[in-house]
């Protein structure tokens, strides 16, 4: 769906009612994303679009986990615009404290590389008591590439994960896999990070945080479906 469509939230509601027992989350859905946003039919989404607020409002109502696909800064960003997307995203997230929201790939991409303040921006959200409902996904080989690029980058990332071990989730983000080895490629790429973490934090990031969030979501969404059956 296009998150700029004012009827996107209604579509999500209909899907839950049409296929009960299937979904526990939505996404990743794209707002501002290099190479992707322009390919989506219809109006161009933005972080200040009321249609996006409606999606998060419905996620809060139904219990769905929302995975937001959005660059943390503009591609080829100028110094004075480093926080432009981030400030809008932070305000959006703050408007929906009852929704469970995961920011995909910590906002990075092939062109959108980590600025020197990248971890500071992430911690700005993690340390905010009004944003305890926001989590970060570290899937994708591009993100792993940045994290393991140097021992210093790995060490700084590990330090942040140790400080907020319940707020990060691992994933693969691979497409059209043909071998078992390919399924574990991103996991193995992150090997220096796993080795830099305590066993408890590593276990939470790799498995337990995902299980906790989506098990809770499944319970809430099934209850919503039962209370809001499709009209016959």
Image: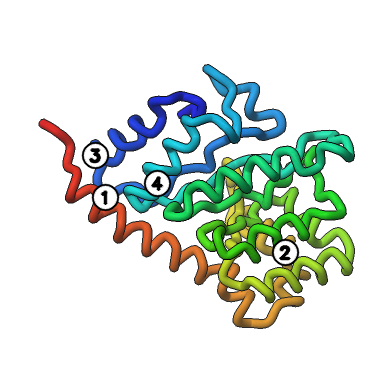
Kind of element beneath mark 3: helix
Dot 4: element? helix
- Tell me, yes or no, whether the two marked residues, 4 and 1, touch with CB atoms within 8 Å: no
Of marks 4 and 1, which one's residue comes earlier in the chain? 1
For disc 1, the marked residue is 21
Measure the alpha-carbon separation of dots 3 and 4: 14 Å
Label total for image: 4
Few, some or many C-alpha atoms within 10 Å of disc 4 (few <14, some 14-19, many ≥20)? many
Q: Could you classify mark 2 by the number of other residues whose Cα lies within 10 Å: few (under 14), some (14-19), or many (20 or more)?
A: many
Choose between 117 and 179: the one closer to the eye.
Answer: 117
Instruction: Tell me the tag on residue 190.
Output: 2
Please indicate whether residue 152 sits to the left or right of residue 58 in the image: right
Q: CA distance from mark 1 to mark 2?
A: 33 Å
Q: Which mark is residue 17?
A: 3
Q: Residue at (23%, 48%) from the top-left corner? A: 225
Query: What is the spatial separation of the Cα atoms under label 3 and label 2, in whole angstroms?
Result: 39 Å
The part of the image, by quadrant, that contains residue 202 is bottom right
Task: Decide which of 119, 168 is in the foreground and name it.
Answer: 119
Secondary structure at numbered mark 1: loop
Disc 4: which residue: 59
């Amino acid at each position: 769906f296009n998150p700029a469509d004012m009827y996107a939230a209604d579509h999500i509601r209909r899907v839950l009612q049409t296929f009960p027992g299937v979904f526990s989350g939505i996404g990743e859905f794209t707002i501002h994303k290099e190479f992707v946003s322009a390919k989506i039919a219809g109006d161009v989404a933005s972080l200040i679009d009321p249609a996006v607020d409606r999606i998060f409002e419905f996620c809060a109502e139904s219990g769905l986990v929302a995975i937001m696909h959005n660059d943390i800064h503009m591609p080829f960003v100028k110094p004075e615009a480093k926080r432009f997307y981030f400030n809008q995203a932070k305000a959006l997230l703050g408007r929906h404290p009852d929704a469970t929201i995961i920011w995909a790939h910590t906002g990075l991409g092939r062109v959108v590389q980590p600025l020197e303040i990248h971890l500071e921006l992430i911690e700005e959200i993690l340390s905010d008591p009004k944003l305890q409902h926001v989590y970060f996904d570290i899937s994708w080989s591009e993100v792993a590439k940045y994290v393991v690029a140097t021992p210093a980058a790995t060490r700084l990332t590990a330090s942040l994960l140790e400080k907020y071990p319940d707020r990060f989730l691992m994933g693969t983000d691979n497409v059209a896999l043909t071998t078992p080895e390919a399924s574990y490629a991103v996991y193995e790429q992150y090997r220096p990070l796993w080795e830099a973490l305590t066993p408890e934090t590593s276990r939470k990031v790799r498995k337990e945080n995902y299980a906790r969030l989506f098990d809770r979501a499944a319970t809430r969404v099934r209850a919503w479906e039962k209370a809001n059956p499709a009209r016959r």
